[in-house]
Amino acid sequence: MDEISVKFTINYNRFKKKVYNYVLKMTGDVMLTEDITQTVFMKFYENLPVLKSENSFPVWIFKVARNEVFLHYRNKKSEPERFDYDETENFNAGSDSFVDTEYEMKELASILKTELENLPYEQKEVFVMKEYGNLSYREIGELLQIEEKLVKSRLFKVRQKLINNISKLIS
Amino acid sequence: MKTEDFKELINLYFDGELKKEKEILLFTNLSQNEEARIYFKEMNLLKTAAGTLTEEYPDYLDTRILSKLEDKTQVVEKPVDKFHFITAYSVAAILLILSLFLFSEVNSYRQSVEAMHRQVVDQKQTIEMLFNSLPGVIVKSSM
């Protein structure tokens, strides 16, 4: 096995689940997700000899994945929604709105899934990159070409919104 | 501590981006502030719920991607192999021609050395004959 193949195998195993989950959450289509994941890793393999630093791998891989998702939307001629949500949501969660059983957790996960699907594209993207891509604020900022501060504030607001919506539904 | 501040600390903590020195501040605040504890629990719940939505990576996709890559590397390797074969054959042919040339050179050199050797032997015999043909020397005493 040559050096490139070893490097590829290590990073493929490191990122495959994250990329798969990121694309799946962004598209909601399993077959499309598989195709995009395959494209991402084929491109990664082709470009591996020219990629200098290993630190740049997560950003590079997710950039390709993100472009592929955008390409899908462009081909479908259905652009993702713009980032235009009300930033002044009030936090009003009840103190006893916690779940204990596995069944309740499944219910909660299903509510969260619906809430995620209803989020504007940019909000959903930041949340998915963090939760499923496990990227740092810096990496997300680099990917979205925004400042780290903005990443943080977007992420906190999305979470706040999700907590509020879920709390409303539970109560 | 303001509501927004402790919320930020909690978010940073869950994202693994809270500095160690600030953890004490967070936990002190959690022990004293009921609102912070509620938010912490809600964040924990959100994280857990988000975690349960993580899908497993399908095994067949592994096979699909890796076999596709294998095909690709084989296609890339073929011209490289052909190139190696051509180079190896050319080098072998050059070495063969070179060894034939060197063999003939060595052969002719050996023949010339043998001829010279023969000539030297002949000359030595001629010199010996000349010496032998000279009259013998008689040594007389002067006393």
Image (cartoon, coloured by chain):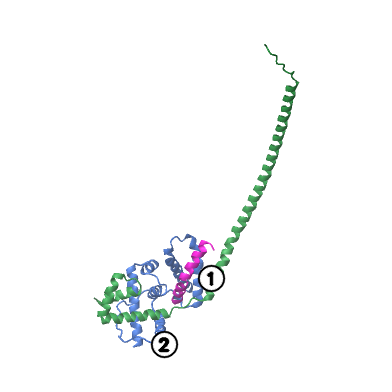
As for residue A9 lying within the magenta part, the answer is yes
Q: Tell me if residue B97 comes above or below residue A67 in the rendering.
A: above
The chain letter of the blue chain reads A
Name the dominant secondary structure of the magenta segment. helix
- Tell me the kind of residue under disc 1: Ile
Q: Is residue B83 left or right of residue A156?
A: right
Q: Chain B: what color?
A: green
Q: Mark 1 points at which residue?
A: B65
Q: Mark 2 points at which residue?
A: A103
Q: Residue A171 carries which label?
A: none
Tell me where the magenta segment starts and ends, as one range: A1-25
Q: In which quarter of the image is residue B38?
A: bottom left
Residue at 53% over, 74% down: B61
**Quadrant of the snapshot with the N terminus of chain A:** bottom right
Residue most toward the top? Answer: B143
Q: Quadrant of residue B139?
A: top right
* Chain of the residue under the numbered disc 2 shown in the image: A
Q: Where is residue A72 in the image (x, y as percent from the top left)?
A: 48, 72
Which of these two is toward me, A112 or B131?
A: B131
Q: Are marks 1 and 2 on the same chain?
A: no
Mark 2 closeness class: few <14, some 14–19, many ≥20 residues within 10 Å = few
Q: Where is residue A119 in the image (x, y as percent from the top left)?
A: 38, 78
